[in-house]
Amino acid sequence: MKKDLGVIPAVYPMPVLMVAAYDADGKVNVMNVAWGQICDEDKLILFIGEGKKTWLNIKESRAFTVALADRDHLVEADFFGIASGNKISDKFERTGFHAVKSDKVNAPVIEEFPVVMECELLDFLDTEYVSGVVGKIVNVKAEESVLNEKGKIDPRLTGALMYDEFTQSYHVTGDRVGKAFGDGIPLLNK
């Protein structure tokens, strides 16, 4: 029997995404976003509130990068979520991380994270109920250490973090348990 828990954001897992953009002076800011998702083959949406430092930077630069946070950089990833770029001017520098300018968009690529999507700003969504940033993925970069023998990203090798809203904790991706678009086929033929 199910027990009523009230209203909670009961979606699991949620990706831990590191969103980076330059400000008008070329300074790097990174924020931790768990409320983001792919919304088309080459598009993603990030639910970032208007006025956040990264939101303002994206508005200014019209570009951003989205990296998958990983187990090896959990402390810094969490810091990027709890520290405000509007209040801490040396937020990025405090981590000791390194950034290089993307060769595809006007945004920083954080070298420490193994997988990064380089994105152009498509639109801002601003309704009574949602504030979001929609981006077009123009390229994905990945460290060779997270690629399988076929040159594809292997989630088990990334150590990618997932956010658990239920317990406010981080987890990492696990073992493969099935084949998408394949395991359900026997039920089609029933």
Image (cartoon, rainbow, N blue to C red):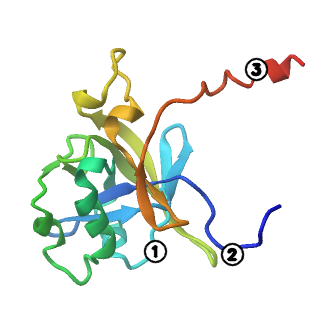
Residue bearing mark 2:
7
| Circles 1 and 3 in contact, beta carbons < 8 Å | no
Q: How crowded is mark 1: few (under 14 residues within 10 Å), some or many (20 or more)?
A: some
Residue name at image x 86 percent, y 16 percent: 189
Whole-number angstrom distance, CA of label 1 to CA of label 2 = 21 Å
Q: Is residue 162 left or right of residue 180?
A: left
Ranked by sequence position, the earlier of labels 3 and 2 is: 2
**Tag 2 secondary structure:** loop
**Tag 3 secondary structure:** helix
Residue bearing mark 3:
185
Q: Which amino acid does label 3 sit on?
A: Ile
Q: Which of 133 and 30 is in front in this view?
A: 30
Q: Nearer the viewer, mark 1 or mark 2?
A: 2
**Tag 1 secondary structure:** loop
Q: Which amino acid does label 2 sit on?
A: Val
Ranked by sequence position, the earlier of labels 1 and 3 is: 1
Residue 96 visible in this rendered orientation of the protein: yes
Whole-number angstrom distance, CA of label 1 to CA of label 3 = 41 Å
Screen quadrant of the N terminus: bottom right
